[in-house]
Amino acid sequence: MKHLRPGEYAFLLLSSDLGDPGRKPLTSAQMRQLFQRARDLRRQPDRRDLASADIIQMGYSRAFADHVVALLSQEAELQYYLDRARKADCVPITRASEMYPAAIRQRLGLESPGVLWAKGDLSILQMPKVALVGSRDLQAENAAFAQEVGRQAARQGIALVSGNARGADKLAQNACLEAGGNVISVVADSLETHRRQENLLYLSENGFDEPFSAQRAISRNRCVHSLGAITFVAQARPQQGGTWDGTEKNLRFGWSQVYCYRDGSLAQRMLWDMGAGAVDMADLADLPRLQWNAESFFDQ
């Protein structure tokens, strides 16, 4: 594991539960606000001698200040956690790291995770990317669309981002890998359960060892949607499930450009009304051409 800078230790201490569900780290919004206020007052949250009085001077309550100082003091717990991560072949990418995905930082703003844990080929983060989301139970034509997104991403030298769930995610990821492509899989379970695999990078929010939960599955969707220049929706259920929730939020906040498979379903028509585009299988032959905004497809 590479040497971490002081600011990266601070992000880990403040934003991770370090394997302790009762630790109560700061939220993403609290983290960003703290560092902004610290910068304005020329205080460094990673200073070892940071006192509660320094944080109170930033406008916080005594209780919050004491909590921050307590989190920053747990260096021994952090080192133990990092040692465990090293043995599990997992590395942290904090928001203070140069490797942290710029797309997530820029598009999610206050909601960007303080730490992403990674397992696999980190160079995939530097590739242009498209994302694929969809239901677990698919119609045959929608399943074929998910697979074609994966194949076309591989053929065009673009990494595929997805969530590793049964159904659309796995179909697209497997098709991409079988075609020799590269995949970023943002998982909602422990990275310890996944084996390192060629051309595949696993990412997880905040902890490398956290088990699956419905909350984690919903939360990671924002990372899937914001990593790619385009997010394709293979199939969704109107106003139900994680695919709908993530896509609706993407359209509301503009995390990435959204295209739904043109299947004529109620969900596709509703997402169209919200601002999503619609594509057929043939439209996937030139993925960069689908991006209509000013940002270059390859500036990811």
Image (cartoon, grey):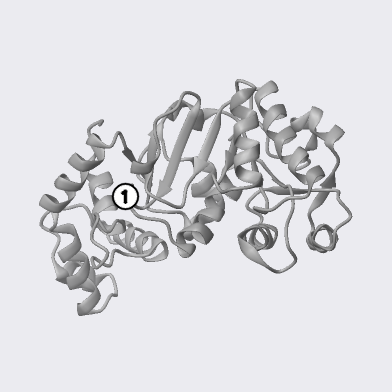
Q: Is residue 44 visible?
A: no
For the C terminus, the image quarter is top right
Query: Left or right of 82: which side holds 225?
Result: right
Name the spot of residue 49 as percent of width and height, x first. 10, 57
Q: Nearer the viewer, residue 148 or 2?
A: 148
| Residue at x-position 23% and y-position 35% | 87
Q: Nearer the viewer, residue 269 or 178?
A: 178
Quadrant of the image occupied by residue 90: top left
Q: Is residue 254 visible?
A: yes
Query: Left or right of 234: which side holds 67?
Result: left
Query: Left or right of 35: which side holds 277?
Result: right
Q: Which residue is mark 1?
A: 209
Name the spot of residue 94 as percent of width and height, x first. 35, 45
User: Looking at numbered disc 1 in the image, what kind of residue is underneath it?
Assistant: Asp
For the N terminus, the image quarter is top left
Outermost residue, right side: 264
- How many marks the image carries: the answer is 1
| Residue at x-position 79% and y-position 37% | 290
| Residue at x-position 27% and y-position 67% | 24
Query: Left or right of 270: which side holds 60?
Result: left
Name the spot of residue 227 as percent of width and height, x first. 57, 43
Is the residue marked by circle 1 packed among few (<14), some (14-19), or many (20+) residues within 10 Å? many
Q: Nearer the viewer, residue 164 or 288?
A: 164
